[in-house]
């Protein structure tokens, strides 16, 4: 959820808060040359890794820029280590990413981690349930609000084993209830 003020937008995630500061520059629509953001390839031009893919923020303060260099204006400053982002494109040491609200921009690779995290899907008004095993019939061990941040241990295509950040409570959550993993994606 983002509440905007003339010069400040705030991204709230249940127990986490990120601050975002809009830029005065025009938004980036993808590649540095102004073309569409993704290349149509299914692997990155720099790393050769699958595109798109999910990554997470490495630290508490990460700047999203409108273009792939420090010469470009800052679009947002995220203040939530571990926040999942979808990586769409690679350009040198810069990555085009999208957050759960659909905001895209460029981040330096030093700000990103391959560690898998997810949030309880913001569109799930009732949140999600953490269960003792990967089954709808399993005991509910926790009820989580939309936006709760989870560390992903593994996903089998329908269920993920995850730990609720800051609480150290773990269990299984239906993959369809998460933003940070793809439907039917297997994470080992």
Image (cartoon, helix red, strand yellow):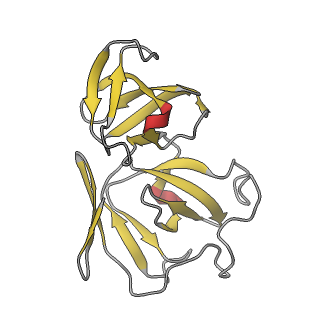
Q: Looking at the image, can residue 188 be seen?
A: no
Q: Residue at x 36, y 53 (%)?
A: 59
Residue pictured at 27% horizontal, 28% vertical: 143
Q: Residue at x 37, y 70 (%)?
A: 76
For the image shown, how many numbered marks are present on the structure?
0
Q: Is residue 24 visible?
A: yes
Across and down, in percent, residue 72 comes to 49, 82
Eyeballing the image, is 167 above or below 180? above
Farthest residue, direction front: 125
The quadrant in which the C terminus is found is top right
From the top left corner, tell me how far across and down residue 181 is, in percent.
52, 40
> Is 21 located above or below residue 13 in the figure?
below
Residue 69, x across and y down, in percent: 54, 76
The x, y position of residue 179, in whole percent, is: 46, 44
Quadrant placement of the N terminus: bottom left
Horizontal arrangement in the rendering, residue 12 relative to residue 119 (left or right): left
Query: Viewed as shown, does residue 138 lie left or right of 186?
Result: left
Q: Where 148 falls versus 42 (above or below)?
A: above
Specify the quadrant of the image occupied by residue 133.
top left
Q: Which image quadrant is residue 173 in?
A: top left
Residue at the image point whose x is 30% and y is 18% from the top: 140
Return the residue found at the far right. Answer: 41
Horizontal side of residue 14 vs 63, given as left or right:
left
- Seen from the viewer's position, the closer of residues 132 and 127 is 127
């Amino acid at each position: 959820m983002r509440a905007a003020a003339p010069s400040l937008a705030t991204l709230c995630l249940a127990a986490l808060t990120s601050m975002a500061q809009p830029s005065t520059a025009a938004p980036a629509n993808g590649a540095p040359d102004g073309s569409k953001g993704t290349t149509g390839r299914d692997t990155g031009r720099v790393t050769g890794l699958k595109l798109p893919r999910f990554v997470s923020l490495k630290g508490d303060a990460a700047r999203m820029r409108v273009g792939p260099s420090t010469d470009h204006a800052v679009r947002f400053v995220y203040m939530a280590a571990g926040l999942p982002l979808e990586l769409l494109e690679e350009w040198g040491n810069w990555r085009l990413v999208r957050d759960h609200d659909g905001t895209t921009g460029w981040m330096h690779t030093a700000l990103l981690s391959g560690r898998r995290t997810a949030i309880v899907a913001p569109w799930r008004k009732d949140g999600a349930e953490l269960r003792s095993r990967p089954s709808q019939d399993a005991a509910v061990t926790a009820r989580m609000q939309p936006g709760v941040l989870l560390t992903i241990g593994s996903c089998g295509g329908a269920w993920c084993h995850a730990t609720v950040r800051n609480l150290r409570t773990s269990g299984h959550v239906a993959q369809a209830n998460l933003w940070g993993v793809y439907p039917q994606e297997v994470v080992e």
